[in-house]
Amino acid sequence: MRDKTKMIHGGITSDERTGAVNVPIYQVSTYKQDAPGEHRGYEYSRTGNPTRHALETVIAELEEGNAGFAFGSGMAAITSIMMLLESGDHVIMTDDVYGGSYRLMTKVLNQYNIEHTFIDTSSEESVINAIKPNTKAIYVETPTNPLLKITDIKEISTIAQKHNLLLIVDNTFATPYWQKPLTMGADIVLHSATKYIGGHSDVVAGLVAVKSNELAERIHFIQNSVGAVLGPQDSWLLQRGIKTLAIRMEAIEQNTKKLIAYLEQNPRVEKIYYPGLENHPGHHIAKQQASGFGGMVSIDVGSGDLADKILSKVEFFTLAESLGAIESLISIPAKMTHASIPADRRQELGITDGLIRLSVGIEDIDDLIDDLEKSMQ
Ligand SMILES: *Cc1c(COP(=O)(O)O)cnc(C)c1O
């Protein structure tokens, strides 16, 4: 089955008893047992719920894994995965990971003596140099936020295998429609499904997929023990989102291409960060490991004042954090998502006050272009 068909017919798509073409929302916490200890696959909804199970099945199929897991948020998914580690273990992490992941490592897991090193994972040499005797995992985000840096998943997986480390990939920006880390040697792939997978800015959720049965068992044990599970209503919403993931990603990328063509000839735009551009340092790797470049673009307009002005004037780009929805979103990372990073460190990374991040939606592209054109005047 190909991806577009999998999104519609993959996983568990209907209700056998009634013929309903969608999996119902099993809004239930517990299940009647036929005899003590004899149940029909479900005992208690933290351990398993049929609506959540249907979602977990389809994400596993889309990522070409053998098991999937749904959590109450992307951060709940990441935290649960980190619970695979023990006190004293060390993790190597992409230096410009999502701010919440950075906070989890530096303010929460540090209290449990889980060590970390943040490095530029687009450099294999840096990854190798960061390996310590207690290193247990490499955690990669690609593309990253907001500069869309690319890490070569295959290269890093070779390093991880050689040193017996788990390779964990945050695939939120690319989605399984464009990029499948498990097929390139990653052990665990995860998503903030709040973004493209849900796609409609109406649900907060996290998804995980793995290939190995041993990891699947351990993650299920953690999911059930920690209890950060996704509810049936939200599981159902994500399945609905997945049905249109392919067409949304296609439409978003088409819009993004046209928007970039416009931005390239706009004299106010000093720099464009997009992995689909030839001059992007990760372009060739992105082209090899992903079948699309996605809908996230960052532009530098040179000054914080101009960036502020644009954001105060836009009509169709909604000023908001988050990304990956059908509506276009706009933000200034230096003042919003990345405000907690010290100013000099931000400057060093290229996250200037004039850097604007765009999450392109599926509105009519001509309206989006007109919107930016008017706002820049
Ligand atoms: C939003 C996001 C997260 C966190 O997910 P939540 O659903 O907000 O908890 C993790 N990684 C990336 C790349 C994200 O964009």
Image (tube, helix red, strand yellow):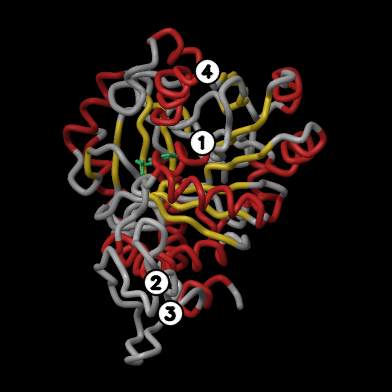
289 with respect to 79 (left or right): right
Q: In whole angstroms, how far apart are the C-alphas of marks 1 and 4?
A: 12 Å
The quadrant in which the C terminus is found is top left
- Work out whether residue 305 or residue 173 is closer to the camera in this orientation and state it: 173
- Check disc 1 and report the residue beneath it: 83
Are the residues flagged by discs 1 and 4 in contact, CB closer than 8 Å?
no
**Residue 184 appears left or right of 74:** right
Q: Which label sits in the foreground, 4 or 3?
A: 4
Percent of width and height locating residue 241: 36, 65
Q: Circle 3 is placed at which residue position? A: 13
Q: Earlier in the sequence, mark 3 or mark 1?
A: 3
Q: Amino acid at mark 3?
A: Thr
Where residue 82 sits: x, y (%)? 52, 35
Q: Respond yes or no on whether mark 3 lies under 8 Å from ligand 1.
A: no
* Label pair 4/3, CB-CB below 8 angstroms: no
Q: Amino acid at mark 2?
A: Pro
Task: Give the mark, 4 or 3, whose residue is nearer the N terminus.
Answer: 3
Q: Decide: marks 2, 3 in contact (CB < 8 A)?
A: no
How crowded pointer 1 is (Cα within 10 Å; few <14, some 14-19, many 20+) is rated as some
